[in-house]
Image (cartoon, helix red, strand yellow):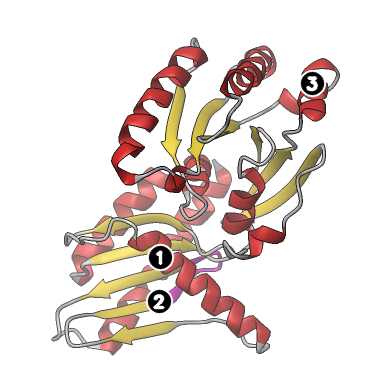
Amino acid sequence: MRKKVLLMGKSGGGKTSMRSIIFANYSAKDTRRLAATMDVEQAYVRFLGNLILNLWDCGGQEAFMECYFATQKDNIFKNVEVLIYVFDVQSQEMDKDMHYYQSCLESILQYSPQSKVFCLVHKMDLIPDDFRDKVFTEREAVLKNLSKPLDCSCFRTSIWDETLYKIVHQLVPNVTRLEKTLKNFAEIIDADEILLFEKATFLIISHCTRKHHRDPQRFEKISEIIKQFKLSCSKLAAQFQSMEVRNSTFACFIELCTPNTFVLVVISDPTISTEVTLMNIRNARKVFEKLEKDGIKT
């Protein structure tokens, strides 16, 4: 199953940096050495075993943008599943940015009218906290109006978050059944929270939370910690397999769930032993493996 994802926006807007952090295990610091994208860079990311994301990262220099709409429309805009357009919130050429975005929408309507459209208002971490909501709300209203008759979803983003991944998550088959199964599993084993991660990228696919947590960005933080730990393991010619973290208030387990996923289970009940939790995870594997196989058939 192959899905074409088009990533567009002005040069220097942060498209390639986000792509590299999320799908190529770059750290934010590593992206400083990335050069500007020339023309179109294609990358294939195997996700959940059967889903192949064909990422088209389109250079945002003016010469390239003009060429996309003049001579490459059929090649670039045909069979697009998702269009992701990145806007630099600090851009000094907003009128030109909007012009290129509108040209992009016209091409999408012509060649891939069924595609989903997402706008990322990027580098929001550079806007003072007190003004972020106002700046984003105003920009969102403009973009939604400009996108008609297409339906556009807008997100405020920075290099540190995983909004790009959250968008691609919508392409994953069987997500609804997966979330329902995770909820049932959490209730059966009395877990506070269960997260399901994609094995290669260690990004969250689905989760079930039964106990309120005050940190809404914990998923991204956990993902980043484990990705860096996996990189450290690989440098030592070792392979990450599992992890257990325990203190006086909770126990956390990370185990292989299916050939393409890891599961993280958080339990605060001190009477539940490690052996029991690991046994429950092993017993659940067949259920999640079947869901994964069903997704391949759909």
User: At x 57% / y 32%, what residue is drawn?
Assistant: 91
Quarter of the image that includes the C terminus: top right
Residue 72, quarter of picture: top right
Q: Is residue 37 left or right of residue 248?
A: right
User: Pointer 2 and pointer 1: residues touching (CB < 8 Å)?
Assistant: no
Considering the numbered disc 1 on the image, is that residue within a helix, a strand or a loop? helix
Q: Label 1: how many residues lie within 10 Å, few (<14), some (14-19) or many (20+)?
A: some
Would you name the residue on which mark 1 appears? 221
Q: Which residues are magenta?
A: 255-261
Which amino acid type corresponds to the residue marked 2 in the rendered image?
Answer: Ile
Disc 1 to disc 3, C-alpha distance: 39 Å
Instruction: Please tell me the numbered disc located at residue 254.
Output: 2
Q: Is residue 1 left or right of residue 279?
A: right
User: At x 37% / y 70%, what residue is drawn?
Assistant: 264
In the displayed structure, 232 sits above or below 163; it is: below
Residue 131, quarter of picture: top left
In the displayed structure, 68 sits above or below 268; it is: above
Considering the numbered disc 3 on the image, is that residue within a helix, a strand or a loop? helix
Which marked residue is nearer to the observer: mark 2 or mark 1?
A: 1
Q: Which percent across, then down, holds residue 76? A: 76, 27
Main SS class of the magenta portion in the image: strand
Would you name the residue on which mark 3 appears? 66
Residue 288, quarter of picture: bottom left
Q: Is residue 205 left or right of residue 8?
A: left
Q: Label 2: how many residues lie within 10 Å, few (<14), some (14-19) or many (20+)?
A: many
Instruction: Please tell me the numbered disc located at residue 28.
Output: none
User: Pointer 3 and pointer 2: residues touching (CB < 8 Å)?
Assistant: no
First along the sequence among labels 1 and 3:
3
Is-magenta flag for residue 79?
A: no
User: At x 15% / y 85%, what residue is drawn?
Assistant: 270
Disc 3 to disc 2, C-alpha distance: 48 Å
